[in-house]
Image (cartoon, rainbow, N blue to C red):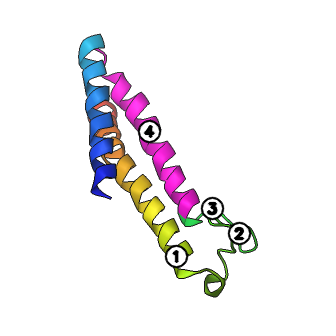
Amino acid sequence: MLKSFYLGVLALIVVCVVCLITNSWIYIYRISGVIGAVSLAACGIAIGAFQSGGEASFAGDSVSDVMSQTKKSQDSRIEWSTRFLLFGLPNVIAAGIYIYIVFL
């Protein structure tokens, strides 16, 4: 799972290189913010946070009835949501720091 965090940091480094080349730091807010928001949304979808009780989950079974899910299904959802969270975390932090510095 640490690979996901490293890939997120790598994506942030690529965005910073683009910012250095173009001399426009607004891309940290735009690109990293979008990467972070999309990965956090994917984390919520994978964990089943945006579903009502009767809808199907990522693994195909009901989120509201935890007893109907297999242990493998629960572990898979948690593992994927953690991967998405770790990938988006560096980008969300960078976008947040940029917003704090520029807009406050």
Classify 67 as above or below 16.
below
The answer to whether marks 2 and 1 mark residues whose Cβ atoms lie closer than 8 Å is no
Which x, y percent locates residue 56? 72, 67
Classify 32 as above or below 22.
below
Marks 1, 3: nearer the viewer = 1
The answer to whether marks 1 and 3 mark residues whose Cβ atoms lie closer than 8 Å is no
Q: Earlier in the sequence, mark 1 or mark 4?
A: 4
Which x, y percent locates residue 33? 42, 37
Q: Earlier in the sequence, mark 2 or mark 1?
A: 2
Q: Considering the numbered disc 3 on the image, is that residue within a helix, a strand or a loop?
A: loop
Classify 12 as above or below 5.
above
- Residue 103 got which mark? none
Q: Which residue is mark 4?
A: 35
Q: Which residue is mark 2?
A: 52
Q: How many C-alpha atoms fall within 10 Å of the one at disc 1: few (<14), some, or many (≥20)?
A: few
Q: Earlier in the sequence, mark 4 or mark 3?
A: 4
Q: Does 5 sit left or right of 46 as displayed?
A: left
Marks 2, 1: nearer the viewer = 1
Q: Does 42 sit left or right of 67 as displayed?
A: left
Q: Give how far apart the Cα atoms at labels 1 and 4 are.
A: 28 Å
Q: Earlier in the sequence, mark 2 or mark 4?
A: 4
Quarter of the rendering occupied by the N terminus = bottom left
Which x, y percent locates residue 78? 47, 68
Magenta span of residues:
23-46
Q: Give how far apart the Cα atoms at labels 1 and 3 are.
A: 21 Å
Q: Residue at x 56, y 73 (%)?
A: 73
Q: Give how far apart the Cα atoms at labels 2 and 4 are.
A: 26 Å
Q: Give how far apart the Cα atoms at labels 2 and 3 are.
A: 7 Å
